[in-house]
Image: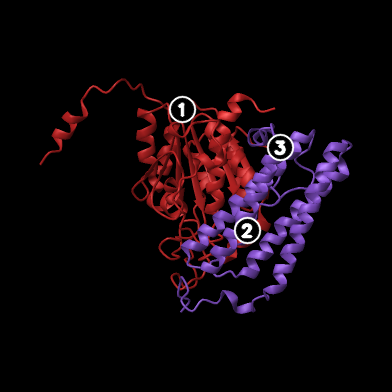
Amino acid sequence: MSSTTEPKIGNLADLLAVAWQIEADAAERYDMLAGQMEQHNNPELVAAFRDLSRAEGIHRDEIKRLAGDIDVVAHAREVATWTKGESPEAVDLAGAHYMMTPWHALRLALAGEQRALAYFKAVVESTRDPAIKKMAEEFVEEEAEHVNLVHRLLRKHKAPPDSWSDDLDPPVSLE
Amino acid sequence: MATLDNRLACKPADFKSDVNPIWCPGCGDYHVLLSFTRAFAQLGLPPERIAVISGIGCSSRIPAYTNCYGFHGVHGRSLALAAGLKVTRPDLTVVVASGDGDGYSIGGNHFLHACRRNIDMTYVVMDNRIYGMTKGQPSPTTEPEFDTALSPGGTGVSPFHPLVIALASGANFVARCFSGEINETTTTLVEAIRHPGFSFVEILSPCVTFRPDEREWKSLVHPAPVAATSDPAKAARRIMTDDGFNIGILYRGNRKPYQPPVGPASVDICDLEKDFEL
């Protein structure tokens, strides 16, 4: 996953483009997970991932609106690249399982929100540009809210028992 | 600021089809699909200039999930199909997708001769060391001691060494990737496609259903400690003595690709059809 020091931010347009890409990647990834759960008949998780995707999509569109005349979509192709790892909020698809529960989904989401928070904090700490700092601080505040929200949701969902992945009709017989 | 070309260029999402993949959640092939679409976008090619050809198996479903030309072919015959396509349509970028069963067992012979012919195309094998689609039989790359209900006590048979075989057979570019490293895999695919001749990219892609132990690959893979060589013997020695988890471009050759002169078709397709009439 993402290193907190990249991509480097040179100006406000870079920051907006990177923030847009982070939300776009998160939305796309949750949508992929929802599709996977649809194929594997896990409707509770379909709803959970669709909700998460919708929320990230709203954030993505808000950033585009905030950017005004800056074409963040095109600019993101030039600056929002990660040489090591990935866009911080993109959840790890390898963490998916066909019998996963909402608790697992929220744990994946929490990890993504925490990585995004760490990234924007690193931008705040590393920049000398007051405009970048101000905007990055707003993103930090938003991501911190998201982290708190996921924590609150996690308190509503108990961690599943160790046997959560036991399948009475497994894909391969172990007999 | 963004250039006009950049605004008009295809995005990775443009290379994704509307078909929802049916792979198991957690499967490495989802990552490979992301790497494919990102690589195509980075190459700046329009979808109609790319063809993804496959055989049979979980990995071979990928043409359905990409938005470009595709052909989901016969088991083990993806390379034969792709070779025919590339020699008649050299203007297309041809990418062939396969798995360790389709590519190394059923299609093993085609693999050798595709390397030897060195036609300008890229062969991507998603290796999970098992036949996933048919419920977990050992494949040519399964470890000899891998014990399952379908191979009690393991097969006891040494696994196939695809990268070394590719080098010995004449492949012009050889790399190993891990599906979970999406950016690195994307970069390698871009380089493989750009490299003239037959490029072979093996992607370690975990099968989380029949090989849950492969979830550990994430912590086992590591970058290759030395840069790619253009000496196939040196590359083969390195690969034979590594731990199987070295990731990166391992060999870049400079053989001239095979491309027969192809002129305009001299026979009308309707006349050809007549020859097959019963």
- The answer to whether the residues at label 2 and label 3 have Cβ atoms under 8 Å apart is no
Q: How far is the residue under mark 2 from the one under mark 3?
A: 23 Å
User: Which SS class for mark 2?
Assistant: helix
In this view, B145 is above or below A121: below
| Disc 2 residue type (three-letter) | Leu
Q: Is residue B62 left or right of residue A158?
A: left
| Helix, strand or loop for disc 1 | loop
Same chain, marks 2 and 3?
A: yes
Q: Answer whether labels 1 and 3 touch (C-beta < 8 Å).
A: no
- Chain A visual colour: purple
The answer for which chain carries disc 1 is B
Instruction: Give the residue number, with chain letter if any, for mark 2.
Output: A52
Query: Which residue is pictured at 35% across the width and 34% down the height?
Result: B84
Circle 3 residue:
A67
The chain whose colour is red is B
B275 vs B49, left or right, is left
Tell me the mark number nearer the camera, choosing from 1 and 2: 2
N-term-proximal mark, 2 vs 3: 2
Q: Which residue occupies the foreground of this view, A114 or B129?
A: A114
| Chain letter of the residue carrying label 3 | A
Q: Which residue is mark 1?
A: B257
